[in-house]
């Protein structure tokens, strides 16, 4: 009996083993695919959280292939969005804010025009003292929050103090705190906000266009994350972090009531699932989603959906750590910048869907843009590398974090062969890419959303001392030109300073900026007047065709 | 003797789950990147990292943290989510319910269907029903689940629009909101899972039908129905049970891809979020839960085989 019993047990164990072996390859590769897909699924929200910490677009203009025209009054639009995190919140200042809700629920003091200039929103006008240190904002009258309370200067002052509060850890605090503290904010009367800066900044209002700067009611820090009470065109009905939420038209909005009656936001983490929802008619628009070339062909072939393009929505960069060998040598940096053909990279990595940047991260449509480039010259690059004594293979890090990173790395690798430059591509894990590789390895691939006003762009990403200075570049002249610009109250002279800074950046910085990439998103054919540029979304006019 | 067998099985199971907790803990320690750094992101100054390390208790030695965690887990306290601050169990509860719904449907419908198909294939060996079923099973085995899911979405959600392509209601969805959307993910999982069960059942039925006692039963003039249901099938089910057990465990622990494709708010979706957020307590709970499910399913399969196997069931007569 004992023998039989053992026999039985052994059979079972054998089955488990056999089954395990039979499952082995299938399940094993299934696991790695799962891991890969998981990484892809989280990439979009991460990209938003990390790369989108800037402010509204300076010049990324919408080229909507979506139809414009008369919208029928009313309707409920279903928008799919990537969740920021399972702990996402409606607090605009938070780094985990649920981005798509913000523009619907709130207003800022100022907003951005398509050409990058600063437009009034809750502030109707502003002026500065002669030395650009004291800014006085006249606030809009007769505006009420969704809870019926009147909007006053106390709310505006509270919003700024909230952003600067270290406990909130707002990404925009790092931009504003070098020259602004809560003690510098005062409210002489209900319609006036006065902000005193500790150092001159002639571009200060442009820094308030950032999407962390949406105005919240006085004293609402503890509740705003779930109540979403603002002055915007829609008011909150329901909100579940990383789930579904509904906003209803705010008939009392100072800019007029929106066309739509309501918007239902659905969080879908996986990009492919978002596209499937659109193609199955479950949602009308997919937000903050850059669909790849092949998928965009599928979407346009569908009978119910189409695509729209936001021009130059992102800029791609290969940061060279200027504190690490061999990039401490400015000649090596120049060689790496002129060794490649920008048009090759644009064609190979983006199917031509973008604009050549010539190593300048300021978009050509920006008023402060400087049309300056050092032409590609593989022969000169070769001789620069020879002089520098660099012959070793350089490692270039990439990951699947974003769909363009690896194609860009491969395109660069093949394009610089003519200059005798040998690149070996290292693929790193996507979910730790921005902690273990970016700003750690000497040479990698990265990207940012186009959208920072020129002052913030240059000071935040390229200047010594900023935590976002991804190349650790430190150039005294670059810094003093930017300081001069901030002190300059004459707009034309200020522009000159920003252009000087761009020239220094193209010549000496550690940033290879090959191109701006267009963003392609999907929407229902019934949607009209979809308009989005940088971090501005037109929630007032979007609707369904009449 | 029987009780001793069961007791030993139970003890092995507890030991396996304990080893799994240890392995999961060690694996999570080996994840790239410091947890505090991950949470702070680009604001990770050394001082902020040290402060957060202390507040999360990460400055204590690893063995101490493991023992504390194990002590809590024994009492049903799996710690708090680092992201939401809620107890892990209440955080995971809704997601577990949703996966249970999906898994329940797959187990009831999928396994029944697979067993029936397996028996039919075994009974019609090498004739067209067997060839069709075996062909289908081979296909299901070879195609990865996300491809099956995508094909089903294309056909039934996008072209025919019979079912929704994704769940839009999110983690707070009611059963009523989930029900219309649960069928495509359930079908994807069934296709992948069915293949293994069908093939095992088919082989097993063929083996049993050629066994001597079946021939003897036939010779003694028992009806074919009685031979099949009373004598052949219980024995044929025996080896299949473990395949089923392993597949159920896989279902509960690893539906990550399918849930992701359908935006289904289940434990797999939660796991992706936990990995993304480096929410270690939550991740640890999900991993240990998966391991425990695996062990429990295998234990149940063993016990069921004791029940089905006359030689194990009746110790006095066996020899």
Image (tube, rainbow, N blue to C red):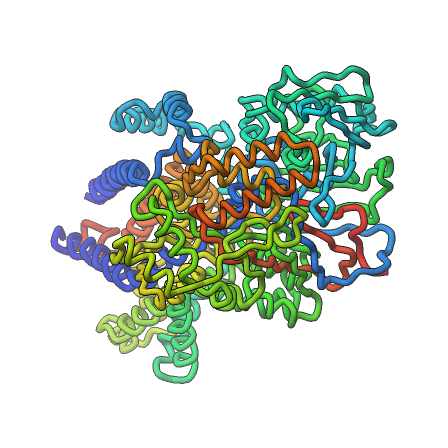
Residue B201 found in image quarter: bottom left
Q: Nearer the viewer, residue B224 or A514?
A: A514
| A282 with respect to B56 (left or right) | right
Nearest the camera: B292 or B283? B283
Q: Is residue B218 above or below residue A386?
A: below
Q: Is residue B152 left or right of residue B297?
A: right
Q: Is residue A485 visible?
A: yes
Residue drawn at x 78%, y 32% as measured from the top left: A122
Measuring from the top left, give residue A454's x and y in whole percent: 61, 42
Q: Residue most toward the bottom? A: B127
- The quadrant holding residue A17 is bottom left
Q: Does residue A278 appear left or right of residue B263 in this picture?
A: right
* Residue A164 at x, y percent in the picture: 59, 24
**Residue at the outermost left position:** A3
**Residue pictured at 38% horizontal, 67% vertical:** A414
Nearest to the observer: residue A113 or residue A325? A325
Work out whether A470 lies above or below A22: above
Q: Please provide percent x and percent y for residue A402.
A: 48, 54
Number of marks in the rendered image: 0
Taking B34 as reference, is A165 left or right? Answer: right
Residue sitting at x 36%, y 55%: A31
Quadrant where the image shows the C terminus of chain A: bottom right
Judge whether residue B112 can be spotted in this image: no
Percent from the top left, x then y, of residue B305?
29, 54
């Amino acid at each position: 009996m004992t023998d039989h019993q053992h026999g039985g047990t052994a059979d079972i164990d054998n089955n488990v083993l056999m089954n395990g072996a039979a499952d082995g390859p299938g399940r094993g590769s299934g696991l790695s695919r799962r891991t890969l897909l998981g990484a892809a699924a989280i990439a979009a929200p991460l990209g938003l959280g990390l790369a989108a910490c800037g402010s509204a677009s300076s010049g990324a203009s919408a080229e909507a292939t979506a139809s414009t025209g008369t919208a029928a009054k009313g309707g409920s639009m279903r928008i799919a969005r990537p969740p920021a995190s399972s702990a996402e919140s409606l607090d605009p200042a938070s780094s985990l804010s649920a981005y798509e809700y913000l523009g619907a629920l709130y207003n800022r003091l100022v907003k951005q025009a398509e050409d990058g200039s600063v437009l009034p929103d809750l502030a109707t006008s502003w002026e500065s003292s002669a030395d650009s240190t004291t800014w006085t904002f006249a606030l809009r009258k007769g505006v009420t929050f969704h809870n019926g309370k009147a909007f006053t200067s106390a709310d505006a002052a509270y919003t700024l103090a909230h952003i600067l509060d270290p406990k909130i850890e707002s990404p925009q605090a790092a931009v504003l705190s070098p020259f602004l503290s809560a003690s510098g904010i005062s409210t002489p009367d209900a319609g006036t906000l006065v902000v005193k800066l500790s150092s001159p900044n002639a571009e200060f209002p442009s820094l308030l266009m950032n999407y962390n700067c949406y105005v919240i009611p006085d004293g609402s820090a503890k509740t705003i994350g779930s109540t979403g009470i603002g002055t915007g065109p829609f008011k909150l009905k329901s909100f579940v972090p990383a789930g579904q939420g509904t906003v209803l038209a705010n008939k009392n909005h100072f800019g007029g009531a929106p066309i739509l009656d309501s918007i239902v936001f659905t969080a879908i983490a996986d990009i492919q699932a978002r596209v499937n929802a659109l193609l199955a008619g479950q949602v009308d628009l997919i937000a903050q989603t850059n669909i790849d070339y092949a998928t965009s062909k599928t979407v346009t072939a569908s009978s119910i959906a189409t695509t729209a393009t936001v021009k130059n929505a992102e800029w791609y960069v290969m940061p060279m750590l200027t504190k690490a060998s061999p990039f401490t040598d400015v000649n090596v940096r120049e060689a790496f910048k002129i060794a490649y053909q920008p048009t090759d990279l644009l064609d190979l990595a983006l199917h031509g869907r973008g604009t050549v940047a010539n190593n300048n991260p300021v978009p050509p449509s920006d008023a402060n843009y400087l049309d300056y480039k050092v032409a590609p010259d593989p022969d000169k690059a070769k001789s620069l590398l020879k002089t520098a004594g660099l012959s070793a293979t350089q490692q270039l890090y990439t990951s699947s974090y974003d769909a363009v990173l690896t194609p860009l790395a491969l395109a660069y690798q093949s394009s610089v062969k003519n200059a005798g430059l040998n690149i070996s591509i290292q693929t790193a894990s996507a979910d730790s890419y921005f902690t273990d590789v970016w700003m750690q390895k000497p040479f990698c691939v990265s990207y940012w959303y186009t959208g920072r006003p020129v002052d913030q762009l240059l000071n935040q990403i390229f200047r010594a001392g900023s935590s976002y200075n991804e190349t650790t570049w430190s150039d005294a002249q670059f810094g003093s030109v930017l300081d001069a610009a901030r002190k300059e109250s004459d707009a034309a002279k200020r522009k000159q300073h920003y252009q000087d800074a761009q020239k220094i950046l193209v010549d000496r910085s550690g940033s290879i900026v090959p191109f701006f990439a267009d963003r392609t998103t999907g929407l229902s054919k019934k949607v009209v007047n979809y308009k989005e540029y940088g971090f501005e979304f037109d929630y007032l006019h979007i609707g369904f065709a009449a | 003797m029987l009780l001793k067998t069961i007791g030993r099985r139970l003890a092995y199971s507890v030991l396996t789950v304990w080893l799994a907790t240890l392995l999961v803990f060690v694996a999570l320690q080996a994840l790239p990147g410091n947890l505090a750094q991950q949470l702070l992101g680009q604001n990770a100054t050394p001082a902020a990292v040290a402060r957060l390390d202390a507040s999360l208790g990460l400055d204590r030695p690893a063995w101490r943290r493991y023992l504390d965690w194990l002590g809590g887990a024994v009492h049903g306290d799996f710690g708090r989510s680092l992201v939401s601050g809620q107890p892990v169990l209440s955080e995971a509860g809704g997601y577990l319910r949703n996966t249970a719904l999906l898994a329940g449907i797959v187990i009831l419908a999928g396994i029944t269907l697979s067993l029936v198909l397996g028996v039919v294939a075994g009974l019609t060996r090498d004739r067209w029903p067997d060839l069709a079923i075996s062909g289908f099973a081979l296909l299901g085995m070879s195609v990865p689940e996300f491809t099956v899911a995508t094909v089903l979405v294309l056909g039934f959600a996008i072209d025919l629009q019979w079912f929704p392509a994704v769940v839009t209601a999110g983690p707070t969805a009611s059963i009523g909101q989930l029900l219309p959307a649960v069928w495509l993910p359930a079908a994807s999982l069934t296709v992948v899972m069915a293949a293994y069960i069908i093939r095992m059942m088919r082989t097993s039925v063929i083996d049993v039908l050629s066994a001597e006692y079946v021939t003897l039963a036939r010779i003694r003039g028992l009806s074919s129905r009685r031979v099949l249901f009373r004598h052949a099938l219980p024995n044929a089910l025996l080896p299949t049970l473990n395949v089923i057990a392993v597949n159920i465990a896989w279902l509960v622990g690893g539906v990550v891809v399918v849930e992701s494709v359908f935006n289904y708010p289940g434990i797999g979706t939660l796991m992706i979020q936990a990995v993304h957020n480096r929410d270690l307590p939550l991740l640890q709970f999900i991993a240990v839960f998966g391991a425990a499910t695996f062990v429990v399913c295998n234990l149940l399969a063993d016990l069921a085989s004791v029940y089905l196997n006359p030689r194990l069931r009746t110790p006095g007569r066996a020899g």
